[in-house]
Image (cartoon, grey):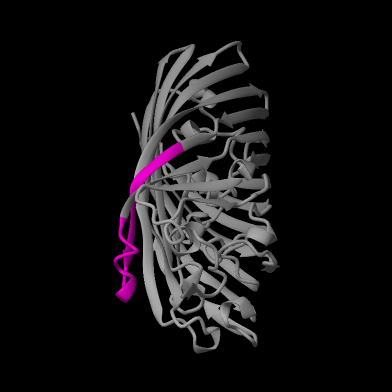
Amino acid sequence: MRLSFKATNSVAAAAALVAVMAPGSLSAAGFGIYEQSAKASGLAGAWVARADDAAANWYNPAALVWLEGGEFQIGTNIINVGDSELTSSDPNFGLFQPTTFEQESNLATPSHIYYRRKVNNNMAFGVGVTTPFGLVTEWGDRPVTFSAAKSELATFIINPNLAFRLTQSWSIAVGLDYLIADLKNFSREVPIDLDMNPLNGPEVVGFSNLSGDGDEFGWNLALHHKRGNFSFGINYRSDITAEIDGDVEFSNFGPLAGIFQSSPGTADLNLPQSLAVGLAWQGNTWGVELDVVQVDWSVFDVLRVDIENNVPGFVDDIALVEDWDDSKSFRLGVWRKLGQHGELRFGLNLEEGAVPEDTLRPSIPDADRTAPSIGYGFNGNKWNVDVYAQTFIFDEITSVGNEEGVIIAEYDSGVTLLGITLGRKF
C-alpha cells in the first residue's frame, strides 16, 4: 500500500491536507486584503497621508485628531474569486501532456465598520472592525484536488485607537488589534494505491479537512503630519500569531477508515507586520498621493500542525515548508473634485507577490500584479457614499518546486473587486 502522487512519506496522508493551509489570496499579496474602504480603494489604497474620514482607523489613525465631530461608516467589497487557471504536465501528479484546470468561481464579501469621535482639540477616539486577511479558493478536478480542494479563511480585527495632537502639524496614534480567525475549510483529496502498482492509479481516494478557530492580540502605531497643501503619514501594524484549535476530519477512506480517524488538531497562523508610508498633495480641485507599503510575509516560513491522535506512518504531525517573501506595493492615487459634493478617483497599484515559485500551490495563485482602480464619492452635509471598482492582473508564474502539494504548473490569474462604503457624520 502506498500514497500516490507525491504523497509518499509517513505524514503525507493526513498532514499533507494542510498544504491548503497556505491560504490563497483574495487581492493583496499572500492572503491579505488591503481594501478596507471604498474611498481609499478608488485610489488603489494610496490613502495613508490623506486619511480624511473614519476609515483612517485602518489606514492611518493618527489623522483622526484632525477630523471634526463624529462619524460612522459601514461598507463591503464584492470580490469575484475564481478567474484563475493552471496548466500542468507534472508526471508526479499523473499528467503527461499539458492540461488546463480552471478554479471554481466564488464570491467573497470582506466588510468593514468604523466609528470616530473627536474628544477635544488634542485627542480623538476611533474603532474599526475590518477583515484584513482571508481567502476563498476551490478546485474541482483531479489531480489538482490531490493538492487542494477548498480553502476558506475569514478573519476579523477589532481595532480601538487613540489619536493625539503633538503640535499644530504633527499627530500620533496608538491602537490595539484583537484578531479573530475562522478556518472554515482546508480540504483535499488523499489518493492511496493499495496494490502498490502506480500504473493502475489509486484504489482509495479519501477526503481530509481541517477547520478551527483562534484569536490573538496585536498593536498598531501611526504618525501624521500636515502643513499647507502637503500631508505625510506612517502606519505600522504588528505581526500576530494565532493558535488555531480545531479538528482534522477524514472521510471516504473505505477499508482504511479505521486508520484514518478524525482527531483534534492545532496549527499556528502567522500573520505579518506591515509598514505603510504615504505623501500627498491636495489643491483646491485635485490632489495626488503616493504610498509604499511593505508586508513582511517572510514570517510565514513553516506551517506547523499538531494532530492529537497520531497513527505512526499514516497520521503524523507536520512542518510544511512555505518560505514566503516580504512583499512591497507602490500605490498611486489621483482625485478630482466635481462640484461641491462629488469626487472622481483613479489609482494604480504595483504589488509584489509573496509566494515563491518553489512553494506555489493551487491554493495560492499568487504572483506580482498590476491593479488599476476607479472610484466616485458623494460627500453631503451629513451622509456620504463612496464606490469603487478595481481589477488585479497577475503576471504569469510557473511553480517549480518539489515541496508537498506543489504541482509543476503555469498559473494565469485575475481578480475583480467592487465596493461601497456608506457614512453618516454627526
Q: Which is more toward the observer, 361 or 233? A: 361
Pick the residue in front: 402 or 54.
Answer: 402
- In the image, is residue 275 above or below residue 169? below
* Residue 368 pos. (x, y %): 68, 58
358 displayed left or right of 16: right
Q: At 65% across and 28% down in the image, what residue appears?
A: 231
Q: Residue at x 67, y 40 (%)?
A: 291
Identify which residue, 353 or 57, lies in the foreground.
Answer: 353
Q: Is residue 132 magenta?
A: no
Tell me if residue 63 can be seen: yes
Tell me residue 167's x, y (percent). 61, 10
Magenta stretch contains residue 256: yes
In this rendering, the answer to whether 93 lies above or below 325 is below
The residue shown at (64%, 55%) is 355
Give the vertical position of 172 relative to 24 (above or below).
above
Total numbered circles: 0
Q: Is residue 287 visible?
A: no
Q: Residue 233 vs residue 423: left or right?
A: right
Residue 337 picture quarter? top right
Where does the image place residue 185, in percent across and percent down from the top left?
A: 37, 58
In this picture, which residue range is highlighted in magenta?
242-262
Say which of 27 and 47 sits in front: 27
The spot of residue 120 in percent (x, y) is 42, 12
Q: Is residue 354 left or right of residue 136?
A: right
Give the position of the C terminus as an image quadrant. top left
